[in-house]
Amino acid sequence: AEVIIVPDAPTGGGIVADEIAALIRRRPDAVLGLATGSTPLPVYEALRDRLAGVDVSRVRGFALDEYVGLDTAHPESYRSVITREVVEPLGLDPRHIRTPDGSLDGIARAGEDYEEAIVAAGGIDVQILGIGTDGHIGFNEPGSSFASRTRVKTLTRQTREDNARFFETIDDVPMHCITQGLGTILRARTLVLLAFGEGKAEAVAGAVEGPVTASLPGSAIQLHEHVTVIVDEAAASRLA
Ligand code: F6R
């Protein structure tokens, strides 16, 4: 992976936003892989002015993951987050932006449908990734298969604690999620992994320099030919 150390998150977000804006100018129907959580927010923020005046009506997007059993109208469902942070501010067409169906009714077919939709779109051009403190990418928790496709997973206690900040109490954080698999992520044409802050240092070191192992799902990025890792000094502090 190419590792870029930036002074702060807005700088990192700007670098990724420049790449994405150039991609969309070149290819107006580009397919974006969209992460949620705090990390990619500076990317979406920076895209607001980078995309001003650019025709984004044909841009397509696929979220990495969604909670299972949380109403899509809930403000912390990833559908809501993507709508609020990406679709509305950037003026994307919501019909072209998909999130996995985490509803209990849809769950049986949701993984397969999502995989088919990604293939039908021609694959993801650039997949934005954050990384969990436990090394997950998407919600592929430790132990996930490198061949995995979009499917239901159980969130670790660590991830539920990390994400409790978005909910009233940890008990409100769903137990399950539906996430693109590591195999799905590895099929994207390019990967951009961002991480900021001391809390990510160990996961970043494992992902970039550690053994390629299912115990640290982020290490799957080492199997991909086109990966950029963007980190601040704190997140880079455990790199050799
Ligand atoms: C979000 C996702 C997760 C997050 C990770 C880091 O769609 O798939 O892998 O990227 O949990 O979360 P933050 O950025 O909130 O620290």
Image (cartoon, grey):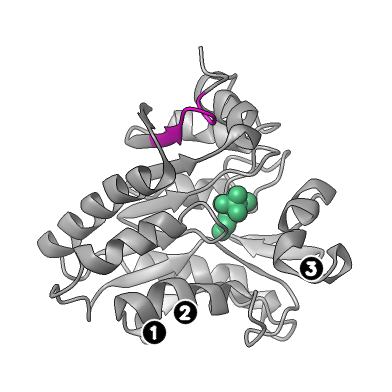
Can residue 220 be seen here?
yes
Per the image, label 1 sits on a secondary structure element best described as helix
Q: Residue at x 29, y 63 (%)?
A: 47
Earlier sequence position, callout 1 versus callout 2? 2
- Pointer 1 or 3: first along the chain: 1
Q: Tally the marks.
A: 3
- The residue carrying mark 2 is 83
Residue 198 is a magenta residue: no
Mark 3 Cα shell of 10 Å, populated few (<14), some (14-19), many (≥20): some
Indicate the secondary structure of the residue bearing disc 2: helix
In this picture, which residue range is highlighted in magenta?
229-236
Report if residue 233 lies within the magenta region: yes
The structure residue drawn at horizontal position 75% and vertical position 82%, both measured from the top left corner, is 104
Report the residue marked by disc 3.
174
Amino acid on which the number 2 mark rests in the picture: Thr
The crowding category of the residue bearing disc 2, from other C-alpha atoms within 10 Å (few below 14, some 14 to 19, many at least 20), is some
| Relative to 159, 26 lies left or right | left
Seen at 51% across and 51% down, the residue is 39
Ligand 1 has an atom within 8 Å of the beta carbon of the residue at disc 2: no
Say which residue label 1 marks. 94
